[in-house]
Image: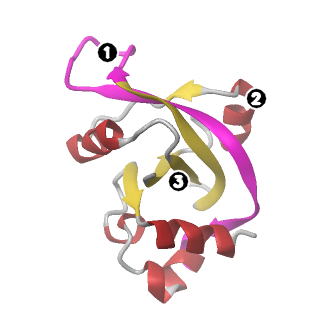
C-alpha cells in the first residue's frame, strides 16, 4: 500500500463537505508532477486530507476507491482524477507548523514543495502525522 497527501482549500472543498458527500473524484489537478502522483495511486491506498491556505492542517484520512481515469471536467486527455472516500477525521488536526517542527518530517513534499497538491508519503511519515493527530 502507498500513502499520499492531497491538499484542498476549505472554501473550495472542505473535509466537512467531503464527509457529507461520502465520495468524490479528485479533480482540478493541473500540475504534471501531481497528475503523475494521481496515476500512481492504487485502490485501497490511504490519503491524508490537508486544508491549504486557510487552516493549514491535516484534518482527516481518506482512501482511494477508484484508480485514475480521464478528468470529467476537461476534454484535455492530459488530466486525470481518482475517486476518494473519507475514512476518519483526525482527533486533533496537525498543523503545518507542527509538521515543520518535526525532524522526521523535514523532507516531505508538503514542506519542500509547498505548491504541490498531490504528494507521496513514506509509511513512517504517514504514521508519524497520524500519531501527532491522535
Residue at mark 1 = 74
Pick the residue in front: 134 or 29.
Answer: 134
Q: Quadrant of residue 107?
A: bottom left
When the figure is inspected, residue 21 is found, relative to residue 92, above or below; the finding is above
Q: In the rendered structure, which disc, 3 or 1, sits on the residue that comes first in sequence?
A: 3
Q: What secondary structure is the magenta-colored segment mainly?
A: strand
Q: Is residue 91 magenta?
A: yes
Q: Is residue 3 left or right of residue 14?
A: left
The residues colored magenta run 69-97
Mark 2: few, some, or many residues within 10 Å (few <14, many ≥20)? few
Q: x, y (%) of residue 21?
A: 70, 25
Residue at mark 3 = 52
The answer to whether residue 129 shows anywhere in this view is yes
Q: Is residue 63 left or right of residue 39?
A: right
Residue shown at 54% from the left, 49% from the top? 46
Give the CA distance from mark 1 to mark 2. Answer: 25 Å
Q: x, y (%) of residue 7?
A: 49, 49
Q: Secondary structure at mark 2?
A: helix
Amino acid at each position: 500500500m502507498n500513502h499520499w497527501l492531497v491538499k484542498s482549500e476549505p472554501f473550495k472543498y472542505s473535509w466537512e463537505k467531503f464527509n457529507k458527500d461520502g465520495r468524490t473524484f479528485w479533480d482540478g489537478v493541473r500540475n504534471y508532477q501531481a497528475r503523475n502522483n494521481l496515476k500512481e495511486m492504487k485502490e485501497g491506498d490511504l490519503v491524508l486530507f490537508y486544508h491549504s491556505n486557510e487552516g493549514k492542517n491535516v484534518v482527516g484520512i481518506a482512501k482511494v476507491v477508484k484508480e485514475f481515469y480521464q478528468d470529467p471536467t476537461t476534454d484535455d486527455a492530459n488530466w486525470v482524477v481518482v475517486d476518494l472516500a473519507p475514512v476518519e477525521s483526525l482527533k486533533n488536526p496537525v498543523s503545518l507548523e507542527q509538521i515543520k517542527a518535526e525532524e522526521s518530517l523535514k523532507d516531505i513534499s508538503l514542506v519542500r514543495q509547498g505548491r504541490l497538491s498531490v504528494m507521496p508519503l513514506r509509511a513512517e511519515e504517514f504514521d508519524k502525522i497520524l500519531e501527532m493527530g491522535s
